[in-house]
Image (cartoon, grey):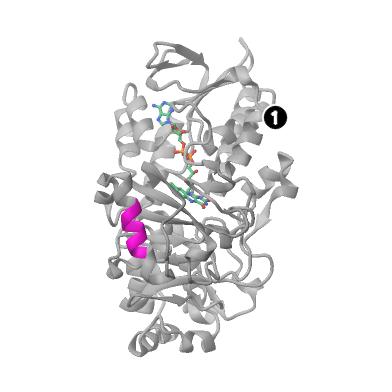
Amino acid sequence: MAAHVLVAGGGIAGLAVAYELNRQGIPFTLVEERRRPGGVVLSEEIDGFVLDAGPDALLIQKPEAVRLCQELGLGDRLVPTQPPRNAFIQRGGRLHQLPAASVLGIPTEWGPFIRTGLFSWPGKVRMGLELVIPARTDDADESIGGFMRRRFGAEATDYLAEPLLAGIHAGDVERLSIRALFPRFVETERMHGSLLRAFRRPPAATSRPAGDTAPAAGQRGGDGAFRSLPGGLSEMVRALVAVLPAASLRFGQRITALSRDAHRYHIVTEAGDTFSGDRVVLATPAFATARYVRAFDTRLADLCGTIPYASAATVSLAFRRSSIAHPLNGSGFVVPKKEATGILAGSWLSSKWPHRAPAGHALLRTFLGGARDPDALDLSDEEMVARSLRALTPLIGITAPPLFTRVYRWENANAQHEVGHLGRVRAIEEAVAAHPGLFVTGSAYRGVGIPDCVADGRAVGRQLGQSILATPAT
Ligand SMILES: Cc1cc2nc3c(=O)[nH]c(=O)nc-3n(C[C@H](O)[C@H](O)[C@H](O)COP(=O)(O)OP(=O)(O)OC[C@H]3O[C@@H](n4cnc5c(N)ncnc54)[C@H](O)[C@@H]3O)c2cc1C
């Protein structure tokens, strides 16, 4: 019997598995609950505006997503962020530009850091003391907040780490793992002691190891750290699906159970269909994966069930350019929890990317919810829009109502890699290895960003190919 692979979940991770299987000529069936592919990757065109409902940016330092776009023939369509590549942080009701010379907010030059109004003088002095704070010597994991407070003090934690490093994960700065999400910081501390000193060295000495997921916010020059596509990242999803055999893709099919007999796995859907294969990749969120594997491995189910998720909403707001006083000279801003404006961040999408709004117009979006404010997801669409406008107006001078708005809700869509995550993933990998033919992938495990999910999905696809080659056909 020829090998057949089942792929559960048609987000970017599941699609990357399918792409890699297809390249190797391995038959598969991908089963996805939604009627469309891509999971949280969704962009829509409305009245000449391109709305990014979920992710908008591909980090190029992790090249796997950009490489996939190139393989799919989208290489010429990749666009960099538009200059000026400024990022702002709100403090005291004002927007402060993140000093341009920084690595994820950690200053790499003294001048801009000394001049910024983002930090108080005592805060700056405490950050400067990082130069002499001894390196931690043990291997224990730590929260992003714990790490940053220990090295740079409370102010840097509240106004940098919380909104920027935890904010991009919609997460809680006191719970997210520094080792899982920013291994570069841990490694730099281990090797050089001070991050300030190390980041002031020539770039070659501080190259980024795989694993960091954050944008190098505030970095300028060159061609920027990110790429997108003129039609939003759904372009990548459409191009991916176009090269896959249509008969292998089952959308609008909610998986309700996974069972296993001596040689095969069986996916059962709500509609009562059963799909069978001798190998299965679970590219569904970890809480869904936990439900399926409980039928045959309660420990693996419990382990998957320990990966938390946060919910967030994005609100897109389309304006006439003349209705906004601010120059919108950057990609947008993040809002520290202490500012309590009810939003996590605001993006100026039509300044950040080309082609997001027709000439003479502007496209903005806000982020609400996250681990910081889970109740925000209970708001109606109208309340989310009103809250966004209340938060934006005093900062950027909005003088007329938006032309239209769209609210996108992402319930339990942001995997949270909390302290101890790397150990939890090792335990999951060991438990998975006890079941021949079973694989897991997706943002819950070895990386959150799209480049991580593409890399992991493709790696799983290659592993499957090797395991199939090594098994004689029956
Ligand atoms: C608002 C937002 C903005 C982001 N911005 C960025 C960014 O700019 N850059 C970046 O790199 N990353 C970003 N991320 C992170 C990144 O987009 C995600 O981590 C990644 O896309 C997750 O891919 P995935 O395939 O693991 O999961 P998902 O996209 O969640 O896919 C899982 C799939 O499983 C399906 N599924 C679930 N249950 C079932 C079931 N019972 N039966 C069948 N199917 C099921 C779901 O419908 C879904 O399609 C962002 C995330 C969010 C939410």
Say above or below: 169 vs 336.
above
Compared to 17, does 278 lie above or below? above
Query: Where residue 196 appears, x then y in whole percent?
Result: 49, 80
Q: Is residue 327 magenta?
A: no
Residue 155 percent coordinates (x, y): 33, 78
> Is the N terminus in the top left, top right, bottom left or bottom right quadrant?
top right
Q: Nearer the viewer, residue 98 or 327?
A: 327
Mark 1, Cα crowd under 10 Å, few <14 / some 14-19 / many 20+, is some
Mark 1 lies on residue: 23
Drawn side of residue 299 relative to residue 437, left or right: left
Q: Amino acid at mark 1?
A: Arg
The reply to whether residue 136 is in sight is: no
| Percent coordinates x, y for residue 35 in the rendering | 48, 26
The residue range painted magenta reads: 385-391
The one of 63 and 368 positioned closer to us in this rendering: 368
Residue 283 is situated, as x and y percent measured from the top left of the image, at 47, 33
Chief SS of the magenta region: helix
Residue shown at the point (61%, 17%) measured from the top left: 247
Task: Work out which quarter of the rendered image holds the C terminus and state it.
Answer: top right
Kindly identify the residue that appears in the image at 39 percent across and 47 percent down.
Answer: 414
- Residue at 39 percent across and 86 percent down: it is 124
